[in-house]
Amino acid sequence: MSIRINREKCTGCGKCIEVCPGTLLFKEVEGSKAFIKYPKECWGCTSCLKECKFEAISYYLGADIGGNGSIMHVTEEGNELHWHITDAGGNKKIISIDRTKANSY
């Protein structure tokens, strides 16, 4: 499991780098695009997905976690987070979560 950064969508803002708890994201020079240096070390916290406002980062859901090759990205609308999941066949699903209630049980 790891993230993928779409370099065409990445603006180089660096927000993903600031929030990555594993310090796995980098830019070569100021203004360049972000990249992940050691993808196998990403533990999938999804902090970078939630921070990226340009949908440039997606998360690969491998068979090891039941995703069978699906990819996921996040958009935000007020307190709502929308998790966009596209399976290997191209089928799309959106799961919306109110972030103010995300940790309630």
Image (cartoon, rainbow, N blue to C red):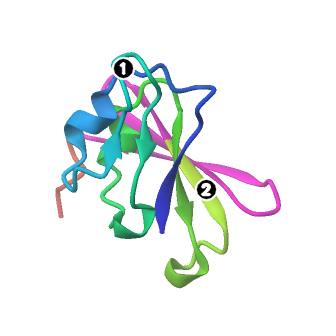
Which mark, residue 89? Answer: none
Query: Magenta span: helix, strand or loop, mainly?
Result: strand
Residue stretch in magenta: 74-99
- Classify 56 as above or below 48: above
- The percent coordinates of residue 46 (x first, y second) are 35, 52
Residue 12, how many percent across, how many down?
42, 22
Let me know if residue 89 is in the magenta part.
yes
**Residue at image coords 60%, 80%:** 63
Q: Position of residue 84 (x, y in %)?
A: 57, 45
Amino acid type, mark 2: Ile
Q: Is 77 left or right of 54, judged from the image as shown? A: left
Please name the residue that numbered disc 1 is placed on. 13
Which residue occupies the extreme right position in the image? 89
Q: Amino acid at mark 1?
A: Cys
Badge 1 crowding class, 10 Å Cα cut-off, few under 14, some 14 to 19, many 20 or more, is some
Estimate the spatial distance between the alpha carbons at disc 1 and disc 2, rounded to whole Å.
22 Å
Q: Residue at the bottom extreme?
A: 64
Q: Closer to the N terminus: mark 1 or mark 2?
A: 1
Q: Which residue is nearer to you in this view: 7 or 46?
A: 7
What is the number of the mark on residue 71?
2
Instruction: Note whether 5 is above or below 27 in the view shown.
Output: below
User: Dot 1 lies on which element?
Assistant: loop
Residue drawn 30% across the image and 58% down it: 45
Q: Position of residue 62 (x, y in %)?
A: 58, 73
Residue 78 lies left or right of residue 74; in this view the side is: left
* Relative side of 81 to 45, left or right: right
Depth check: give the residue in front, 15 or 46.
15
Which residue is at a point 56% across and 79% down the rendered structure image?
Answer: 66
What is the secondary structure assignment of the residue under circle 2?
Answer: strand
Residue at 29% x, 28% y is 15
